[in-house]
Image (tube, rainbow, N blue to C red):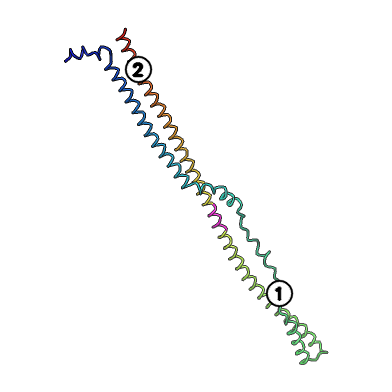
Amino acid sequence: MELMDFLDPGDVFGLKEDKRISAANDALSKAYEKAEAADQMNRDLYGQYNTKAQQTYGDLASKYNDYLKSFENQEVYNPGQFGDNYTKTVDDFYSKFANQRQQQAMNALRESSDIFSSDYQDAMAAKQQALASEEWDKAYDKYMQDRAQAANEFNMNAQLGQTAYQNQLNKNQTLLGQAAGAQDNLMNAYGNYVNNLANSNLANAQNYSNMVQAQTANNNSKKSLLGRVFG
């Protein structure tokens, strides 16, 4: 059997080795084609990943500038000063009937006293002063009650306004943070996409280079074999 193999014309002219080299080159080409097919599948997955990231975060990320503008343009809440809003005075609560009541009291005093006596004059002055003071005290008490009520209402409204302002500020900050996070997610997704493609390109280039080098080496072996056969 060994003698027959040795005398095989295919061996003498290198035909069997040539076939083996050609088969090896074909195998290398097919392996490279499979690698390319697998790489294309990976590229499709990279693309799907990037598209999914755009669908998930793109809309929110696109609103970043709008949310930033809302945050920057929100005016600081200022309820003002209570004194600038409350302008009433004691006179606003002084009864319009005070003078009439004083006049009635004076008439009663006049009818019951000797208007020409010094006691009458003293009593008249004292009565007038007392009535005026009493009316003023009533007006002042009403004024203070009204002012206190107005101050309570002012403080309550100011607190509600401050709470509403803070809630809106928190909302604007939250939305801005979410949009910024969405932008970061998009950038990371795109960075991964580009990095994967770059790595894929390098791997493709290396695979192609390895195939070409291997096939070149095989072809050189074939030439060397033919050179030895044909001298």
Task: Determine the residue located farthest toward the left in the rendered image.
Answer: 1
Q: Position of residue 36 (x, y in %)?
A: 38, 31
Give the amino acid at mark 1: Asp
Give the amino acid at mark 2: Asn
- The mark tally for this picture is 2
Query: Which region shows up in magenta?
Result: 165-172
Residue 204 found in image quarter: top left
Q: Position of residue 133 (x, y in %)?
A: 72, 78
Q: Earlier in the sequence, mark 1 or mark 2?
A: 1
Q: On the rendered structure, is 29 left or right of 162? A: left
Q: Residues within 10 Å of mark 2 (few under 14, many from 20)?
A: some
Q: On the rendered structure, is 182 left or right of 85? A: left
The quadrant in which the N terminus is found is top left
Q: Residues within 10 Å of mark 1 (few under 14, many from 20)?
A: few
Q: On the rendered structure, is 154 left or right of 49? A: right
Task: Determine the residue located farthest toward the top in the rendered image.
Answer: 231
Query: Looking at the picture, does residue 170 appear above or below residue 135?
Result: above
Give the numbered dot on residue 219: 2
Task: Identify the element where label 1 is drawn.
Answer: helix
Residue 167 magenta-highlighted: yes
The residue closer to the viewer here, 169 or 225, is: 225
The residue closer to the viewer here, 132 or 228, is: 228
The residue closer to the viewer here, 226 or 135, is: 226
Give the numbered dot on residue 92: 1
